[in-house]
Amino acid sequence: MNEVLILEIKAQLYDNLEKNGIVILPPMDVNDSINLLKSTGLAATVTMLDPWYNRGTGGVRDDYIDFILNILNNVKDITTHLYLWGFPEIVAQFVDKIPAPLAFSTWLTWYYKNNPSVIRGWRSSQQTCLHLSTPSGKLYPEKFFNDTQRERYQDKKMRFIPGPPSVIEESLLVGFIGKKEQTAHPAQKHFKVYGKILKMTTKRGELTFDPMCGSGTTGEVCQALGMKAILSDMSEEYTQICEKRLGLKRLDCPALRQLIPTSPITPLPTVQIVIPKQNADDVIQMQLNW
């Protein structure tokens, strides 16, 4: 990479992080954004990876496992913690393929019981988040203490440190649930879900990197919790949603435009299912998750 361009990009990244706390990159491939961070010497406390799940709306690719492993290998040296999202049967394929220095930490489950059954069979009600971390990764369960626990912790009277449960129960953002939070992204995560996992692994002022940021939930959580974030997505549509949601414009850097040509992808269609409610005139509108 051109060293002069890299120095210019680095200066603007640092300046915008210091000024706004959040940087939205222009649309680019996930590995391009990872390479950009590596070239500028930035490292993240947390990296959030929420790719299409190789099923449903996002489509299927035969090389999905290699695709994700390539991303993991590329980002492994610039992050302390990493969260990899997917359906259980998808994520399970990576448990024994985690590249060092990352290692398995926890199998997290997001449980939602408001997913209407739209098929003849088992009703999907969960997504998995694989928490990976390096040996230096720290956890902050004390952020989840109640008042009594906090007092005992401060007085050094706790025999052990209780942590939050590995099952996170929050509703899907569908229909009238979380309507004010909805962004029209077909697979948007709940603010409270991301809030819990970032609080567990990140302190105020530390950096979270999300190179598949979708509609920007990571950025909104980081804004609320006083953390810094660098966001990127391949989609021009989702980048625009991020800008509107976070009240920020993408990084306007001529050097970046020279270094990494952007190729916005055509946004994928939202699949909507309308399910009539019994004995009622209104309906449940549901956007399928991946």
Image: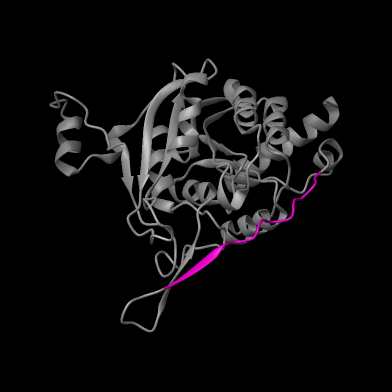
Q: Is residue 122 above or below residue 148?
A: below
Pick whichever, 276 or 290, lies toward us: 276
Residue drawn at x 73%, y 34% is 32
Which image quadrant: the N terminus?
Answer: top right
Please state the horizontal and vertical placement of residue 264, each as a whole percent of the image. 76, 50
Residue drawn at x 68%, y 37% is 30
The part of the image, by quadrant, that contains residue 237 is bottom right
Residue stretch rendered in magenta on the structure: 262-275
Pick whichever, 244 or 290, lies toward us: 290
Q: In the drawing, does residue 289 fall left or right of residue 142?
A: right
Q: Is residue 202 visible?
A: no
Whether residue 272 appears in magenta in the rendering, the answer is: yes
Q: Is residue 252 visible?
A: yes
The part of the image, by quadrant, that contains residue 13 is top right
Please state the horizontal and vertical placement of residue 83, each as a whole percent of the image. 48, 34
Name the dominant secondary structure of the magenta segment. loop
